[in-house]
Amino acid sequence: MAERLDTGQLTDEVKQLARAQGAVLVGVAPVERFDPMPPVRDAAPKGAHPRDFLPETKSVISIAMPIVNAVLDAPAVLADREMEMIPDHAKYEYLELFYDRVGHFLHDVRLEFIGQSVAQFLLTQGYESMIFPTTGLHPHVQGMTDLEIWETHPDHRRFRYTYGPFSHRHAATRAGLGEFGYNNLVLTKEFGARQRFNSILTEAKLAPDPLISEPICLREECLLCQRACIVQCITMRNDPELRDYRSLSSDDHARIFIDTPAKTDPTLCRRRRDGIPDSPVRGDCLRVCPLPDIPRHLPKRLQTMIDEWQGGARSLPGRTPRQPADGIGSQDTDKTSDAVS
């Protein structure tokens, strides 16, 4: 067993290893950030708190890989065009599979690989760790259909869809990588909504990253993500009985959304083609987001929304389409102490 490094050295080694393996954003949260505390944060569901998986968890490492812009945008743009080599009756499914392969599956596997590499390193340092699948799990239950498991069975009706065992989005906001947006996705300063996350739990006490200090989501000044959803599966949370910022109020602009202000019905999303056979390739709530820069390669429907939005004098000051955002690769910008504003 190698001699243990001190907290600062160990944290640096973990981050360097994660980046060397392909992570672009890396942040650390102390496990205490997953407990409800003023101002009230969402409590992790039973069976989904870090200490449910690793009782002695002290730190949660959040890692992210960006989705390459053209990978997200090109399939949707091609849906508007004739594809000589792909028959029309197969084009939608073809483009969905295209996007799924290089916009989801690739990240899923690579992020899991990075998590394994980090956990192995921590093991050599004498610390137990836990890794996770990047996305939701789809178990088969004998005698039940997928619909019965997640939607219609009286014991499970509230779930509506399959979920992962641990929320990588909530880990990302608590590790200082970003905040939730009105699209129920985590937005980062570097890539907006265009990244995927994974997490590693560890018994090691690592140096925590500060939470972000300024909002990233443009809030009601934008709302493009909700307009872009053709089935309106994204809605705002309104839980006044919980007495926290999830009950939307006039001071939203001053708050950092460590927990999500929105909610998504994933069943509506995956069934968007029911009755709408020409629905767009999934991902419009990501594509249309004008952060960190105005997208420049969008399908006609989304481009029209962007043009109308910019025509309302809501353009981002000082930015041209897809100009690199400041601070890519830096974990020290736009962050403050552990306090939530």
Image: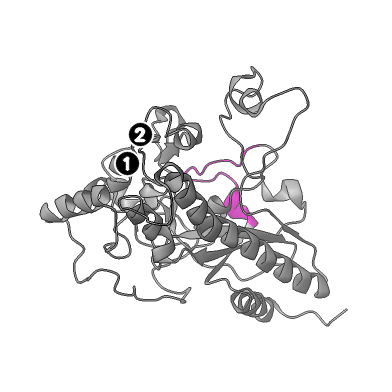
In the rendered image, residue 113, in percent from the top left (x then y), is placed at 69, 66
Q: In terms of secondary structure, where does tag 2 sit?
A: loop
Which quadrant would the C terminus be assigned to in this image?
Answer: bottom left
- Decide: is 229 above or below 329: above
Distance from disc 2 to disc 1, alpha carbons, whole Å, reads: 7 Å
Could you say which is closer to the camera, residue 93 or residue 15? 93
Residue 226 is marked as 1
Residue at 48% across / 50% down in the picture? 94
User: Which is more toward the observer, 34 or 16?
Assistant: 16
- Asked if the residues shown at circle 2 and circle 1 are in contact, with their CB atoms under 8 angstroms apart, the answer is yes
Q: How many marks?
A: 2
Instruction: Say whether residue 110 is magenta.
Output: no
Residue 208: x, y in percent?
58, 67
Query: Residue at horizontal 62%, vertical 28%?
Result: 150
Q: What residue sits right under mark 2 in the picture?
A: 232
User: Which kind of residue does numbered mark 2 sit on?
Assistant: Gln
Image coordinates of residue 148 in percent, x first then y, are 64, 22
